[in-house]
Image: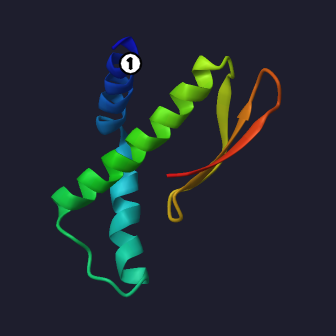
Amino acid sequence: MEVNTELEKRLERYLQSEDFQMDIGALVNEYPSQGLPAPPEERLREEAAADARKCLETIMICEAKGHLWKEKDADPENGTSTLFCRRCGAEEHLRW
């Protein structure tokens, strides 16, 4: 229960951030680059929020294992991130 509350808090902060707006903008550009029409803004918002939720869930699982993750490389266009642990140097490649 506590984990879900923390996840919701983190997600809400993201939804209020400039990062969320930038991610929506990236999605707007991504569809035409793939020869597809951009969907309505509401769908783009839902897609960006769902991607962020998956990413946050993964980060929180790792944090529970004791890692101190820091994002090294992010590629929103392809939905990937590389994280490394500041504590032990472990590296994770995420697809979200």
Q: Residue furthest front?
A: 1
In this orientation, does residue 19 appear?
no
Q: Quadrant of residue 83?
A: top right
What colour scheme was applied to this rendering of the protein?
Answer: rainbow
Q: Residue furthest top?
A: 2
Q: Quadrant of residue 47?
A: bottom left
Dot 1: within a 10 Å radius of its alpha carbon, few (fewer than 14), some, or many (20 or more) residues? some
Q: Residue furthest right?
A: 89
Q: How far across and how far down the image is residue 19, in percent?
A: 41, 44
Asked if 26 appears above or below 16 in the picture, the reply is below
Asked if 18 appears above or below 45 in the picture, the reply is above
- Residue indicated by mark 1: 6
Quarter occupied by the N terminus: top left
Q: Nearer the viewer, residue 54 or 43?
A: 54
Asked if 80 appears above or below 49 in the picture, the reply is below
Left or right placement of residue 8 versus residue 89 in this view: left
Q: Quadrant of residue 72?
A: top right
Q: How far across and how far down the image is residue 52, in percent?
A: 41, 43
Q: Nearer the viewer, residue 1 or 74?
A: 1
Going by the numbered disc 1, the residue's amino acid type is Glu
Q: Secondary structure at mark 1?
A: helix
The residue drawn where x is 38% and y is 18% is: 6
In this orientation, does residue 79 appear?
yes
The residue drawn where x is 82% and y is 24% is: 88
Left or right placement of residue 50 versus residue 86 in this view: left
Q: How far across and how far down the image is residue 89, in percent?
A: 82, 31
